[in-house]
Amino acid sequence: MSRIAQVIVLATYADEVMEPLTRPDESRSWRGHFRPLDLFVGGWVIEFNRVEPRMGLLRHLESLPWPNPGHVQVLIHDEEDDCFGLWMIHDDRLIEVPLPRTQRFHSPAPLSED
């Protein structure tokens, strides 16, 4: 994917899980690192530009040992979306949750791809 996107992860009591993702790591399929959200406990943000790949990010996030997987929320705003999309962990997978009265530019991602 080469689009501009913002990704926010909200997960209470997950500082230890997210800490490695706050450092650059060239071995990951996606580039960049998350920054803690100021004024919000349990929140991290990353922005991808047209050059930095983000392929594999959702798979990476869903594979982490979350203390409360059902409470993890991933918000993704792609450059042409009017609103953030919401992904939550269901049956060990990050699945996009439809938001009532909203329409996103892009169809939800297929279950087998990022």
Image (cartoon, helix red, strand yellow):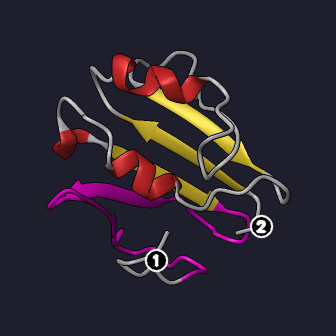
Q: CA distance from mark 2 to mark 1?
A: 15 Å
Badge 2 element: loop
Density class for disc 1 (Cα within 10 Å; few <14, some 14-19, many ≥20) is few
Q: Camera-side residue: 98 or 13?
A: 13
Task: Residue 88 in the image: state x and y as whole percent.
Answer: 29, 55
Q: Quadrant of residue 47?
A: top right
Residue 91 visible, this angle: yes
Identify whether 62 is placed above or below 105.
Answer: above
Seen in the picture, residue 18 relative to 4 is either above or below; the reply is above
Q: In percent of the image, x 63 and y 50: which residue is there?
A: 30
On the image, numbered disc 2 is attached to which residue? 2
Please report the residue visible at 41 percent of the width from the left and 57 percent of the height from the top: 59
- Name the amino acid type tagged 1: Ala
Looking at numbered disc 2 in the image, what kind of residue is underneath it? Answer: Ser
31 falls in the magenta region = no
The region drawn magenta spans 78-106
In the picture of the structure, the residue carrying the numbered disc 1 is: 109
Q: Position of residue 11 (x, y in %)?
A: 33, 32
For the N terminus, the image quarter is: bottom right
Task: Find residue 31 and report its horizontal and vertical position in percent.
Answer: 69, 45
Q: Are marks 2 and 1 in contact (CB under 8 Å)?
A: no
User: What percent of the width, then of the height, locates residue 14?
Assistant: 32, 24
Q: Could you tell whether 89 is left or right of 4 in the image?
A: left
Tell me which residue sits at (36%, 17%) in the image.
16
Residue 99, image quadrant? bottom left
Residue sticking out furthest to the front: 27
Mark 2 or mark 1: which comes first in sequence? 2
